[in-house]
Image: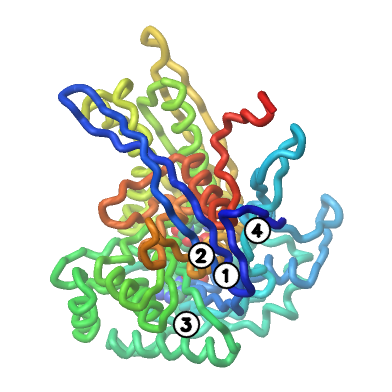
């Protein structure tokens, strides 16, 4: 695709697009709103040179880590495999960047769509170099067998590639994850000195980058869900305080926060795929100083994706959700870890907050704070027989016309890691892309996006936003935000769906 326009310029290194952003400023006058449409000029500058990307996963030997690594290798080497359903070709289904399309315009009256990944230059997932850590020493071939996610025949075909990959020893603070994880922790960095731990992780990152001749590295936490750390401004509040707390091996510094700090200090962006409060204010300040991004929290894969879609539909239709009751049972190691109350609490929080802004937006349905307090219940049970095929059963009860009720009972089988792996890949590819985009408002100097990368909220259950910016959970709005940004950077027109060119030529 090539854009021909007077508002875009391209040379060997950069694509610059000029965009008049139309928004509406609202002023409140008593009980009236005064709406004032306005136009602000933005320029977006995208570095079109594709770097050699390395990714380090924390929890590499887990279900997600092995499924992602194996899945990408299957695609890279075009490995086919057999199951009782026949012969399978590898694909990237479930990946926004690789398998979804974006409308770029109309040809006569036909709408034209291209793959998301083709709108701006992006890293090819098959070119990513993977590395990482795990508290379990199994090589990735054995870890993939343990995970019981991938078809047996594919596991066998991937074995020669995966058995060479062995996770680095990791930091293990037993107090932060479930006690039942202790029996797999045989690959642990010794000692209790948190500063030494930080320095070892930093060295691991630097060595990985140098040994693989990488342009950049991104770190992503896909290890077990930790309990929340007890956040204290004196411990976590600034970069300086956080570093002091690490030096004194403060008990409320989690392993995930050490990894986030190490990433920032090595100039790498950090993504938190679990719900816990890893990205404390001190981490954000470190990231800001290093000019890298942080993004979180918790991958939005099956049940929550659906929830933020269904509730958006109901509220958008003027129907009033009154209760959401979510049961989950799962039998993978994630479920085993979540069977401990402290870890479950982290997950409960991120699963519960995901519809708040959707309800709050509609004051017709929810005129008071009290009414916003709907019955939203989360139950998670560990049932080993279920394996990685998580069952999510949700009942949505909504109030309709004249006091009637509309009830949905949804049964959602989420093959957890087969949904998570492509999503993790998208997070990495998009985070890398955002590192190459700068913007300028009203002809000021070009600058990077905010440190907290809320642009990735489509992929996050509890999206972390820049301070002062409200979080958007509604799935279609999150997707439109990403799609439109990519289009604007490429110099394409943002779609408002009026379709006037088709209706009135
Ligand atoms: P998993 O238990 O299979 O894998 C986690 C891995 O992390 C294990 O191999 C474990 O040994 C390792 N680990 C634990 N503590 C570690 C540490 N301190 N350092 C390095 N490694 C450590 O779990 P999973 O199914 O791969 O999920 C990973 C995370 O992603 C979980 O927190 C889960 O809640 C989150 N998540 C998963 C999904 C999904 O759909 N799969 C969705 C949202 C969030």
Residues under numbered marks 2 and 1 in contact, where contact means CB atoms less than 8 Å apart: yes
Is tag 1's residue or tag 3's residue first in the polypeptide sequence? 1
Residue named by callout 2: 45
Q: Quadrant of the N terminus?
A: bottom right
Residue 311: give x, y in percent of width and height. 44, 32
Measure the C-alpha gap from mark 2 to mark 4. Answer: 18 Å
Q: What whole-number distance in Å separates the C-alpha atoms at marks 1 and 3?
A: 47 Å
Residue 172 visible in the snapshot? no
Q: Give the CA distance from mark 2 to mark 3.
A: 47 Å
- Local crowd at mark 4 within 10 Å, few (<14), some, or many (≥20)? many
Relative to 124, residue 327 above or below: above
Residue 315 visible somewhere in the drawing: yes
Q: Residue at x 62, y 28 (%)?
A: 500
Where residue 318 sits in the image (x, y, percent)? 42, 20
Q: Earlier in the sequence, mark 4 or mark 1?
A: 1
Above or below 359: residue 71 = below
Q: Quadrant of residue 183?
A: bottom left
Between residue 14 and residue 138, name the one nearer to us: 14
Q: Which mark is residue 117?
A: 4
């Amino acid at each position: 695709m090539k854009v021909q326009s007077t508002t875009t310029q391209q040379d060997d290194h950069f694509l610059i697009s000029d965009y008049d952003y139309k928004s509406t400023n609202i002023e409140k006058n008593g009980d009236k709103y005064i709406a004032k449409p306005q136009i602000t000029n933005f320029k977006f500058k995208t570095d079109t040179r594709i770097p050699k990307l390395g990714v380090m996963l924390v929890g590499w030997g887990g279900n997600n880590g092995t499924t992602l690594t194996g899945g990408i290798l299957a695609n890279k080497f075009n490995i086919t495999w057999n199951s009782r359903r026949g012969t399978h070709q590898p694909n990237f289904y479930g990946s926004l960047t690789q398998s979804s399309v974006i409308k770029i315009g109309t040809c006569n009256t036909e709408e034209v769509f291209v793959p998301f990944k083709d709108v701006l230059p992006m890293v090819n997932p098959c070119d990513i170099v993977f590395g990482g850590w795990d508290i379990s020493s199994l090589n990735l071939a054995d870890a993939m067998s343990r995970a019981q996610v991938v078809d047996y025949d594919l596991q066998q075909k991937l074995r020669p590639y995966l058995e060479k990959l062995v996770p680095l020893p990791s930091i293990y603070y037993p107090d932060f994850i479930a006690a039942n994880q202790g029996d797999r922790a045989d690959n642990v960095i010794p000692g209790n000195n948190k500063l030494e731990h930080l320095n070892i992780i930093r060295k691991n990152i630097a060595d990985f980058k140098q040994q693989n001749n990488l342009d950049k590295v991104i770190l992503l936490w896909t290890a077990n869900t930790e309990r929340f750390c007890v956040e204290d401004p004196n411990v976590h509040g600034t970069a300086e305080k956080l570093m002091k707390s690490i030096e004194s091996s403060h008990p409320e510094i989690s392993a995930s926060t050490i990894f986030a700090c190490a990433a920032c200090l090595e100039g790498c962006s950090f993504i938190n795929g679990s719900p816990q409060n890893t990205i404390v204010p001190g981490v954000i300040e470190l990231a800001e100083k290093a000019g890298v991004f942080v993004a979180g929290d918790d991958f939005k894969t099956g049940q929550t994706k659906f929830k933020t879609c269904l509730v958006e539909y109901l509220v958008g239709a003027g129907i009033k959700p009154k209760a959401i009751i979510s049961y989950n049972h799962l039998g993978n190691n994630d479920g085993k870890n979540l069977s401990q109350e402290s870890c479950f609490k982290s997950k409960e929080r991120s699963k519960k907050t995901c519809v708040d802004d959707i309800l709050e937006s509609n004051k017709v349905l929810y005129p008071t704070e009290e009414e916003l307090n709907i019955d939203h219940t989360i139950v998670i049970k560990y049932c080993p027989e279920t394996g990685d095929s998580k069952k999510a059963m949700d009942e949505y009860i909504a109030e309709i016309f004249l006091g009637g009720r509309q009830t949905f009972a949804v049964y959602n089988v989420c093959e957890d890691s087969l949904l998570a792996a492509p999503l993790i890949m998208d997070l990495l590819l998009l985070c890398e892309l955002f590192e190459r985009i700068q913007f300028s408002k009203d002809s000021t100097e070009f600058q990077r996006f905010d440190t907290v990368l809320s642009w990735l909220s489509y992929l996050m259950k509890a999206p972390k936003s820049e301070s002062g910016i409200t979080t958007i959970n509604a799935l279609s709005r999150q997707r439109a935000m990403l799609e439109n940004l990519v289009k604007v950077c490429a110099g394409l027109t943002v779609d408002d769906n009026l379709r006037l060119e088709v209706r009135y030529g």
